[in-house]
Structures are given as C-alpha cells and as structure tokens.
Amino acid sequence: MQIVEELLNGSRVALARAITAVENEYDEAVDIMRQLYSHTGRAHVIGITGPPGAGKSTLTDKLAKEYRNLGKTVGIIAIDPTSPFSGGAILGDRIRMLDLTLDEGVFIRSMGTRGSLGGLSRKTSEAVKILDAFGKDVIFVETVGVGQSEVDIIKTADTTLVVLVPGLGDDIQAIKAGILEIGDVFAINKADREGADRLQIELNAMLDLNQEHMDWRPPIKRTVANQSEGISELVETLEEHIAYTHKSGGLELRRTQRTKSELLALLHEHLSRRILGKLDDAGQFETLVASVERRERDPYSVVGQILNDLMK
C-alpha cells in the first residue's frame, strides 16, 4: 500500500493521512494497521493525565523540548473535547505548541474524544501505533482531563505521569479511586503557588499507605512548566521509570495485558457488528426490542436466543 510505504520512508504527509484514515474509519484503515503492526513496539509511550487546569499542555510542550535536546524524536497526541459542530478537537493543543510544529523531529496531533469516556479518543491506541511505526522514540498522550475516568490512560501508556496543582482540591483528586494506582510518576505543577508543600506532604502520606503493594514508589517532582523549572529533573525521573520497566519486566507485562485488552475489544466490536448486521438484515432487532419493551420477553432470554442462533 502506497501510504504505508511513504509513511515508513518518513513522509509526514502520509503519517497525517494514516491517522486521519484510522480516526475516521476510512475503508483502508484496517489494511493500514495490518501492514504497520510489525513495525510497532519500539517507542515508549508516556501518558500525561490530571485534572483540567493542571497545565498538562504546557508541561507536555516543555517535556517534548527536553527530549529533543536529548536527541530523541517525539510524537504528541493531545486529546481534546469534541466540537458538537464539526466533530473535531475543540481546543486544539497544537495552538499552545506552535514553536514545536516547526521541529521536524516532533509530530503533534489533536484528537477529539468523540463521545468516548475516560479522557481518550477511541482511536488513540491506533494513532500511537502509527507514530510508533513512523519511528518516534517517545510518544506523549495527553488526556482531556476528566477526573476519575483518567484511569483509562493506563490502557495506552507504558509510563503514566499524573499532574496535580496546588489550590484546586488536588488532595481530593489524588484520593479518587485509581489515581494513586495508575501514577508511575507524580508532578506538582505550578509549584510556586501556595499549598504546594501541603499537597506534597498529603500525596506522600497516601503513597506510604500504598507502599506495601509497590515495588516502584512513584516519585513526586515539582515543576513550574511555564517557566521551564524542574523539567530536566522530571525527564530524568521518567527515564528512570523507563529503565526500571525494562529491567523488572514490567513493560512486557503491561504490553501483554494491553494486547489482551485490544484483542478482546476488537472481538467485541466485530461480533457486535456481525450480530446487529444479521438482526437488521432479518428485520428482527426492532421486533425484539418491542417485545422486551412490552414485557412479553425479558432481555436476558432474548440475548440468549440471539447467541444460540448465532452459534448454530
């Protein structure tokens, strides 16, 4: 396929077209992913999540520049809320990273959530694979920032950076179910604000409570991203976690779990389409819905019948 050949030969235009094809589910999208899959698995994916207003975009921008200073190529997928009018990304994080767009070693893509929960677009993992196949060394995935649903980032990232800020009730944010568990590294951004010391103390206390279940204690780093303070130290810590995951086997374990989840998700999607397609072709689905609505049948028996018919 020409688009795949051009992408593998370093064409940024082909890279953008491939992501667009996958995001919009064009006819060639599946073939693109099939041909690129054997070229994936080399990049390290860093998820950046946290509440709205934490400064995730600014921090992502500064981290990308620091990695470029280290000679590494960078891909950035910034997940934004979806415009109700165009269906596209409503904020457009690329506007905040204009100087990075001039760097040939950086590729930035804003993606709308398109109704997906969890702070990620449904097509985020595919876009990550495409950037990986393109040859990016580090890929950042910045979530939209949606509170408790931020935990979805662990399904995509090899390393998860949780960004918190003083003065936004972040002690409560950190306590939320799943946030402590998914964070491999914590960053207190806007650390020049009042309350940074208190936030760090409370976060440390909560991490200590979880320590018995951890073989990696998530470090807490302070940053002031808009002044580029603490960025190099944060990158060093991220690199330490990357080295740790390779040495401990944690990276392999995470990627195995991710592959299982991807296979199950694809299986679920294809089976759902097949079942609904058959029901629609036979004109049965609306009839079954009506019978359940009238309480003539229960949904459990109806689903059992559909599955039995499919298995035959």
Image: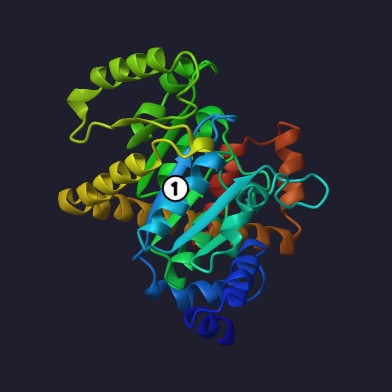
Residue 289: x and y, percent? 73, 43
- 237 left or right, relative to 57: left
> What residue did someone put label 1 on?
63
- 279 left or right, relative to 247: right
Q: Which of 231 and 248 is in front in this view?
A: 231
- 97 left or right, relative to 41: right
58 relative to 247, above or below: above
Q: How many marks?
A: 1
Q: What element carries label 1?
A: helix
Q: Which of 202 and 119 is in front in this view?
A: 202
* Residue pictured at 57% horizontal, 74% vertical: 12
- What quarter of the picture does the N terminus occupy? bottom right
Q: Which of 80 and 96 is in front in this view?
A: 96
Q: Quadrant of residue 176?
A: top left
180 relative to 230, above or below: above
Residue 10: x and y, percent? 50, 79
* Residue pictured at 59% horizontal, 77% vertical: 14
